[in-house]
Image (cartoon, rainbow, N blue to C red):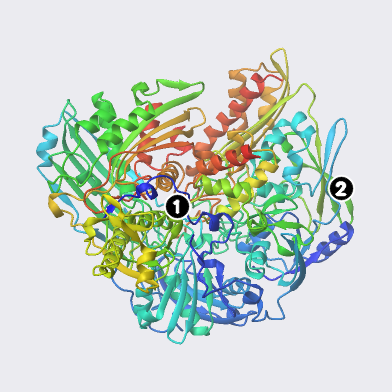
Amino acid sequence: MPRNRGAMTQVDAAGATSTGAAPEVPQVEVTLTVNDTEHHLRLDSRVTLLDALRDHLGLTGAKKGCDQGACGACTVMADGKRVVACLALAAQYEGRRITTIEGLAPNGELHPMQAAFARHDAFQCGYCTPGQIMSAVSLVAEGRAGSEEDIREFMSGNLCRCGAYPNIRAAIRDALAEG
Amino acid sequence: MTTLEAARAVGPGLDRVDAPMKVTGKAHYPNDFGYPGLVHAALVHSTVAAGRIRGIDTSAAETAPGVQAVITHLTAPRLEPGPMTLLGASPPTPFQDDRILHHGQHIAIVVASSPEQARHAASLVRVDYERSEPLLDVHDPRATVVENPWGLDSDRGDVDAGFAAADVVVGGTFTTPDNTNNPLGLMSTVASWNGDSLTVHDSTQWPHNVRATLAAVFKVPESGIRVLAPYVGGGFGAGLRVWPHVILTVLAARQVGKPVKLVLTRPEMFTSVGHRPDSVQQIRIGATRAGDLTAITHEGLSSVAMEDDDYEPVSLCSAVSYACPNVRTQDRQVRLNIPCPGSMRGPAEGQGNFALESALDELAHELGMDPVELRLRNYCEEHPLLGLPWSSKALRDCYLQGAERFGWSRRDPRPGSMRDGRWLVGYGMAGVSYPHYQVPCQARASLHRDGSADVRSAATDIGTGTYTIMTQLSAEQLGLDVSRVHFDLGDSDMPYAPQAGGSGLTSALGNAVGAACRNLIREFLDVVKDDADSPLRGAAPDEVSVSGGRIHRTGAPDQGESYTDILTRHGLEELSADGRSTPPQPDGGGMATAGAFGAKFVEVRVDPDLGLLRVARVVSAIDGGRILNEKTATSQIVGGTVGGIGQAMFEETATDPGTGRIANATFGDYLVAVNADVPDMEVIFVGGPDRATPIGTKGVGEVGLVGVAAAVANAVHHATGRRIRSLPITIDQLL
Amino acid sequence: MHPFEYVRATDSDQAVAVVTEDPSASYLAGGTTQLDLMKDGVLDPDRLVDITRLPLGGISHTDSSIRVGALTTMEELAADPVVRERLPFVWEALLLGASTQLRNMATIGGNLLQRARCRYFRDPTVAACNKRSPGSGCAAIAGIQRMHAILGTSDHCIALHASDVAVPLTALDALLHVQGADGTRTVPLTQFYLPPGDTPHIENVLRHGELITAVEIPLLPAAARSHYIKVRDRVSYEFALTSAGVALVQEDGVIREARVALGGVGTVPWRAWDAEDVLRDAPAGADTFLAAARAALGGARPLPGTAFKVELAQRTLIRTLETVAGAES
């Protein structure tokens, strides 16, 4: 398995804000509950949930593919429902239970959907994959993975430019069959 | 050569070795990296397509909260041009003068403490332009035309005589629009200087090119630059070149003395990292009543930026795909005030094949001949320009096995004759002869005393499966289980690798890895050549086999020993060896080096009232030489086909006629195929190892896309009787 | 994005008061339009009042209507069994609009207030946009026209209203309950939107600070059938090129009641009153449907890039009418 080389540090809270935002930029105090952990942050009020996760909490699993709500790469769950984190203001999501790809199977095991994606080669470059998996897990919870037509329709908010769609569907069918 | 007995490592569909990283979100793409003290950049773009910057007012931006620097052509230092590369000249170095060559050109970079601050400050920069009228249309008579840009125009036989001898002549004008690569990963650069040394994370398909370019532009030694790209969020050609934003990020980092991150926005992805240029193609094909081709002429006209190169020989496919005695192909480029085009998955072939294979379908229809039969009748057993047999060519099997799998024989050739309820059903097909491409590559292999191996090369895996197939290949070549092999890439400190592009990396890298592994075995044999305790003493490389972590004499499994035993006995921690590959000459060894071949069979449904077009089925039959991993290779073909569906039906980068602004530069407006547009597909691999190189592979990254547009258009004709010669095929064309 | 002060509202009256008094304040609900346009630099409020904690959710039912709190998400509304059973074309339009992720965020109130998708409106580097900068002109008319409107346009604006669910809601004469600083009022959806005329920047009758609190949707008669068809290039996840929402009550092959609205073609969700007049008391059949479709598009003002939409919209409406008329109830 490829390793991440250690010379670089991950994005962390200190990285983006330690240089100090100028005082005239409005700030907000926000408590975000992410993957069952509470984080107290002081943020520029403009920071989106996606940027809060990525730049301030070091949770880079959710990806930025368009920053316009049009590609689904940033899909996370809020109170169990899938949302695009790029069109969510971080402050607005205080008190809501956020789940990211990092929290899907916290104990080092793979969630059945993650395992199915690996087995079915349901990705290539992998950039859309965390969003696809979060969407797929939600799809099952929504009861919409029962028919091929439903899977196609209700997974269409997640673009995959590498074109792994048939394998994504196969992975979902397989994960569903496993229960 | 060392005999390989543990062939199981290669071929079957091993799951991607990087899958656990990718499904857990732990794979780190360039914009996932940061540094303490990291600051953020945002770009300012020209809002006119041609002219000069008369004045640029950065005062509001400079005093905006958090801003640390605003750099423009007025404040940027003189930078050197990038080098000439294997893919042509580097894009123009940014910020060297006041000229505007296209809408969206970077004209300032703003650095601030946070991305929010940088982007807002960028919006405060005010620019005063001296406008000139932009050239935006390939038909604009004022535009400069470059004739025969690559010296690849071809002319064989006598096309006038060929057409005179024809019973039937078909053809017309085919057009394809600008397409934008749009990998899902926003192209990003993180640059960090430490004195004269520089570390760069970049969304590149070619780390060594980034290193060489930055060294040239900033006049620093290559040895001090490290470029990292362990994971890249796709590329499809957008990461082949070192684009101006990369240089600007590195410049900004040097200017502010801190690490800088720049993440392009999705709209910037349309103007900053290349695109497939539009084409206008004239094609004519003549044939006898029996279906023998007598003449082909194919002329391609493409757009190119004012001061840049793009390799896009659109018509060349017509010179090398069929046995036809009289063929003339010709390409021209028109210089316009547009963002630099560049390679996009299946460059040139993607456009040219649409015209060639559509025109052949017209010919088959005119002749009343089956389209597959027409192609078989004009099959070329030899390379038409070189007159040599191919190093491998199983295109005949592609046609025949693909047709069989698809059920092509059920096709009623009369247009509009097949229905499914309200839907018209159409079957269409196209052939593909993809060109061969390979450039030199290096790799290094090491075997450790614990019996594990490390193999590495500075290549990239942009989703192609390189991590996985090189792990498999190394395991095979060293006789190890794949779990004992670690293959690493994406770091310019590793041995030189060329770009992931041109469908050339698998062969280039595979042969380098193969050579490194063979050299490593040679090293082991060297160590024991005088070792009385070794059953391998004095054995030559061609007398041994490898399997199960052991080298043994071929045919005598008990006369051998493990790598671990050799290293332990000789007090060595590890042995390493380098390997390199050089591409076979195009006519080397009396054969013409072949790229991949393929046949695409497509079933479409058309709702004639509403103009709806759906792709219902696709069968791809591919000759990709030796397939190292059926699972990832299949994904490459399926993925290419999805890109082809996009090209056929959705994708068109629209430019405002007056201003040169891209009018649909978002994922809401530039349509790529979504899940619901894509049917399940069948992929079959035919043929066997290619003879041109030791490992026998041919790249399959692009052959999946090429041919889809023609096959869809041909299926639309079969369904409706309408010949669509302009992509994409949209509702308005089918009403 | 322009910096702004984030304010979390806990009380409707207070929220309305704050925004009414501050011309540079805006409401924030689902955020899918508001935040998107703020990122693009099209909207630049100094103060953003987050109303998502206000008690404006929930769906209540009577025998004749559904009252939907303005903060109800599109997914929540689509999950309502009465919507699915009694208003199938509303249910279909909800699910054909946006992705599930966006439907989980977007509120019904916000959906009805969504702004134009026009790329000339959404790109502040384009100088000419009367909707964004009154009096500056309209770059779209001379630009790429395919996704623009053909009904209700003016020489000053051709931007489309892209909501799907507004189409059947317009056909149903839904009512908007609105709270302002001076009290509450009720506005029929058919009178809510304003065609661009020479004031494209004024898109509806809301005054600054007024807040939609609920949408009241009348139910169809039990005998009615309805359907929504959306035509677009992709199978899914794209704004409509054309769409039609139709509800019919038929009696012995004769149409007794008809509600028809069109999407993808109008600068506002387009109630096809003329088509309804043709359909009412006419036999359900091809001639009637063709006449209705022609009547619906009678006022179309296409440009070269939108000419195909006149025919496509008619065919879309005919297909929808055929489907509803032929469907088993």
Q: Is residue C285 left or right of residue B392?
A: right
Answer yes or no: is residue B721 visible.
Answer: no
- Outermost residue to the top: C252
Measured as percent of width and height from the top left, residue A117 is found at 55, 47
Q: Relative to C93, is A71 above or below?
A: below
**Dividing the image into 4 quarters, which one contains the N terminus of chain C?**
bottom right
**In the rendered structure, which amino acid carries the disc numbered 2?**
Arg
Instruction: Please state which of the two labelled residues, at mark 2 or mark 1, is closer to the viewer.
Output: 1
The image position of residue B340, as x and y in percent, is: 37, 63
Q: Is residue B254 left or right of residue B222?
A: right
In the displayed structure, B15 sits above or below B310; it is above
Name the residue that disc number 1 marks: B653
Q: Secondary structure at mark 2?
A: strand
Which of the two residues, C261 or A136, is positioned nearer the viewer here? Answer: A136
Tell me the residue at 30%/59% (across/down): B514
Residue at the image position 55 percent from the left and 54 percent from the top: A128
B503 relative position to B451: left or right: left
Q: Choose between C83 and C141: the one closer to the eye.
A: C83
Residue C239 higher or lower than B66, as above or below: above
Amino acid type at circle 1 is: Thr
> What mark, if any, has residue C185 been given in the picture?
2
Report helix, strand or loop for mark 1. loop
Count the marks: 2
| Position of residue C266 measured from the top left corner of the image (x, y, whole percent) | 62, 42
Q: What is the chain letter for disc 1? A: B
User: CB of mark 2 within 8 Å of CB of mark 1?
Assistant: no
- Where residue C204 sits in the image (x, y, percent)? 73, 50
Q: Depth check: B384 or B592 in front?
A: B592
Circle 1 Cα neighbour tier, 10 Å, few/some/many (<14 / 14–19 / ≥20): many
